[in-house]
Amino acid sequence: MTAIDATAGSRDPAAWIHERAVTPGRRFTNGLANAWMVGSVLVALVPLVVIIVYVLSKGAGVISWSFLTKNLPIVTQFEGGGIAPAIVGTLVITATAALMAIPLGLLAAVYLNEYGRRGRVPSVVRFMSDVMTGVPSIVMGLFIATIWVSSGMHFGYSGLAGSLALACLMLPIVIRSCEEMLRLVPDDLRQASDALGARRWRTVTKVVLPAALPGIVSGAMLAIARAAGETAPLLFTIGVTKTINSNPLHGTNTTLSQEIWFNAQTPFSAAHDRAWGCALTLIAIVFVCTVVARIVSNRFATRA
Amino acid sequence: MTALAPAPDADLGADLGANRNAGDVWVDRLFRAITLVAGLLVLAILALIAYTAITKAWPAFRHQGPSFVFSRTWDPNVNHFGALDFIYGTMLTAAIAVGIAVPLSLGIALFITELAPTRVRSGVTYVIDLLAAIPSVVYGFWALAILTSPAANVYQHIADTLGRLPLLSSFFGGPVVGASFMTAGLILAVMIVPIITSLSREVLLTVSQDDKNAALAMGATRWETLRVAVFPRVRSGLIGAVMLGLGRAMGETIAVALVIGSSHQITSHVFRSGDTMASVIAHNFPEAVDLPKAALIGLGVVLFVITIIVNVIARAIANRSSVLRGSAR
């Protein structure tokens, strides 16, 4: 290295070689490629910034204490009322879905990574769970609507029906992220536990899961964030309500996403204002989940 | 390492090894069985979706026959259900979305893996992931309330200029509307950029630095390095990533339903309004009964089958390059 430096004088050798070898045409093509890469990032930033600015500026004017705590107005056309039922519904329905999808997804991931790393059944499960992430959310809604709400078991609209649809959507995402986190746990830990004479289930519950916990929590928060913003699985499953219903098992319900959907389709400015308020509240909930996931996973990364 | 390692946790060791007896064997088998059931649940749910959807849609399929997917008339009042317009709408919007999103996503992924300094890298990744965090309905509402009217003006300009040219006029000619295939495709493009980007990024990270260094040492510029050392290695992985994005674009419902304008037509003109399978279901299912309801479930079946096929092919391609078992959020 020093020898080259000596021959090239004070100049950086890489730059020197570069200057001598690269014709203007090649340099231009390379510059064009660099511009494409940087430009892509900038172009992708535009919708993100514009949407967030619009939601903040339009939503902030609407949100007040009474907007957040009052029941929905009977007629969407006029100002007044609040969105409390939608906030409660979003939280309750998403939490119920998470209670179903996260434990099941974690168990499935334990099966895939701890009991069945190889073999036919695990690889089929793994493949189909990947495929299941691609099933459109509206199909999940149709599925629960036909099997649970109307024809199948006739349970009718309820928060639980919406939660079931969301849980179907979350399950493959949770499996995927949990399996990824379990795979990050070094095999040394498992072998050490085996050497102490532990059965596999003890190794999993006492050694592997505690080690992977921050990653699992972070993945779960991202799945929750995704589910909280979903609309399509809820349209045919939870019905509508104007008052707070905190019981997911009984009665119709509503969510922020569904209120945006309803209000957006009306031509009334009061309804649009309400939708902006809902959008800001929803984005705040989703971003809090995302940021929590980020913080947890960062802590995991620095510790590992 | 060994000298400085903390003393093993005596309690944990005792706890772990304590119950190596017959009872513990059964607990282990039970635990294994429970996790297996949880794993098989995925297969059960997929099978159940297919079974219920097909049985509930059967009356419409039997009533309509193969013309369900080949006829262009969808009129619940006379019980005629031909979904071709909606299938076309789904394909066209997804194609527009992929056409716009792929160059963007690939550029961003290359920026992250090849160009960006380490400190910028994670920031850009995080910001692109934020695009995925914005709910679909918010995209749709924003596009409907804010984007459609300025978009219509831009479309009008494009139609006035390109519409005069012979070939392009059949794609970009007037009359134009704001809520159109193009607007839906644009919003879909924004929504699938994060997925294609994160998958492409993982594929690109699998190319060994040695290969790139070899090309650089031969005097290649960064772009030439990408062409000779990177792209040939990642082709199948990138195709898999793009197809997963395509699958997502075809299944996306709410944002499209808000901005596509809901009209039945098959046209190559991208500035006209149309409808997709998903948006028709979203708009009409709550009020539908009997045969029209079965027909809408039938649309769901068609959509399910198409997206499953796209996803299976994408996963098969991606698994063959064996790197894409990564984030598919």
Image: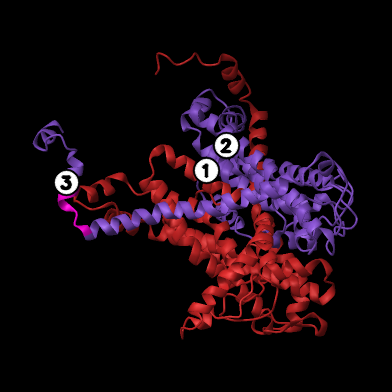
Chain colours: A purple, B red
Q: Which residue is drawn at 50% across and 56% down?
A: B196
Residue B78 horizontal side relative to residue A5, left or right: right
**Location of residue B122 in the rendering, given as x and y in whole percent from the top left corner:** 47, 40
- Find out whether the residues at labels 2 and 1 contact each other: C-beta distance under 8 Å: yes
Report whether mark 3 lies on the same chain as mark 1: no
Q: Mark 2 lies on which chain?
A: A
Amino acid, disc 2: Arg
Amino acid, disc 3: Ile
Amino acid, disc 1: Tyr
**Residue located beneath label 1 in the image:** B126
Residue A259 horizontal side relative to residue A230, left or right: right
Q: Give the range drawn in magenta.
A: A17-24
**Location of residue A85 in the rendering, given as x and y in whole percent from the top left corner:** 84, 46
In the rendered image, is residue B316 in sight?
Answer: no
Q: Residue at x 69, y 66 (%)?
A: B257
Towards the viewer: A28 or B208 = A28
**Location of residue A112 in the rendering, given as x and y in whole percent from the top left corner:** 56, 44
In the rendered image, is residue B71 in sight?
Answer: yes
Q: Which chain carries label 1?
A: B
Q: How many labels does the image show?
A: 3
- Find out whether the residues at labels 3 and 2 contact each other: C-beta distance under 8 Å: no
Q: What element carries label 1?
A: helix
Towards the viewer: B18 or B37 = B37
> What is the distance, in whole Å, between disc 2 and disc 1 at their CAs?
9 Å
**Residue located beneath label 3 in the image:** A17
> What is the distance, in whole Å, between disc 3 and disc 2 at their CAs?
42 Å
Q: Residue at x 82, y 71 (%)?
A: B288
**Residue located beneath label 2 in the image:** A294
Q: Is mark 3 on a helix, strand or loop?
A: helix
Q: In terms of sequence position, does the residue under pointer 3 or pointer 2 come before the other?
A: 3
Mark 3, mark 1: which one is toward the viewer?
Answer: 3
